[in-house]
Image (tube, rainbow, N blue to C red):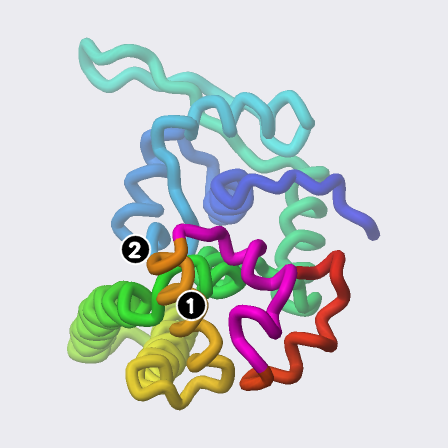
Amino acid sequence: MARRKVANPLAFAVLGSLGERPMHPYEISTMLKSRGKGMSIKLNYGSLYSVVGALEKAGFIEAVETVRDGNRPEKTVYAITAAGRAEFDDWLAELLGKPEREFSQLEAGLAYLPAFSPDRVVELLDQRVKGLVAEVEQLEAAHESMTSMKLPRIFWVESEFRLALVQAELTYVRRLARAIRTDGLEGSGFWRQTHQLVEKLGLQPADLLKDPVKYFGEEFPWLQEIPPDAR
């Protein structure tokens, strides 16, 4: 069954929470926070009520009662509907079983890596390494805590997956920074020389590529193979 493509991850978390029992929005936010779901799903608690309203409008959840705690304002309790359960099931099946191309911010940055000089890129990658190391330490500490609490692994596999991703990125970024620092990255010579010429001559990189032989000589013969509209 093709789902109706509600795309907000917070909506997915709300449906998953209400699949356990009826709750009011504040209970949902408290439960998500206490379970650490913010580590795996980008949770914007400020938009929680608008998400709940959108799910109700779509027929995925429904108000079942209002409750009042002392003199506090009334709270509406919501329950998931049959349509909501079907939507959640289809969504979960899609997330688990269908590989999807995800575009990361790092990938976007790497696509335009040569816009900065090699030295500047190394500086920034080293900065990223520090952030990744900090996240690895944070995740490992969280896992140690959950292990000491005797929590079954099933309750933190998403965090385990995140750790594997961060560790893989850390390994790659360190290797890339080292290759750039030592000019071991193929094309580093051209990259470094381009920035030196731009600074020395006051030209744009595109100006250098209009006549590569003039500026680079025969040192980089592959430049001649680049189509003019790609320069």
* Residue 21 to residue 56: above or below: below
Q: Which residue is drawn at 53% across and 75% down?
A: 216
Query: Which of the two discs, 2 and 1, labels the residue nearer the N terminus?
Result: 2
Camera-side residue of 161 and 187: 187
**Position of residue 34 measured from the top left corner of the image (x, y, whole percent):** 26, 50
Q: Which residue is drawn at 48% across and 46% down?
A: 13
Q: Residue at x 42, y 29 (%)?
A: 48
> How many marks do you count on the picture?
2
Q: Residue at x 46, y 52 (%)?
A: 203
Camera-side residue of 22 and 30: 30
Residue 231, by quadrant, is bottom right
Q: Mark 2 points at which residue?
A: 36
| Left or right: residue 213 compared with residue 37 | right
Question: Was residue 214 drawn as part of the magenta stretch in this picture?
Answer: yes
**Position of residue 177 measured from the top left corner of the image (x, y, whole percent):** 32, 79
| Left or right: residue 196 compared with residue 191 | left
Q: What residue type is labelled 1?
A: Glu
Bounds of the magenta segment:
202-217
Which type of secondary structure does the marked residue at label 2 adopt? loop
Please give the label number shown on residue 214.
none
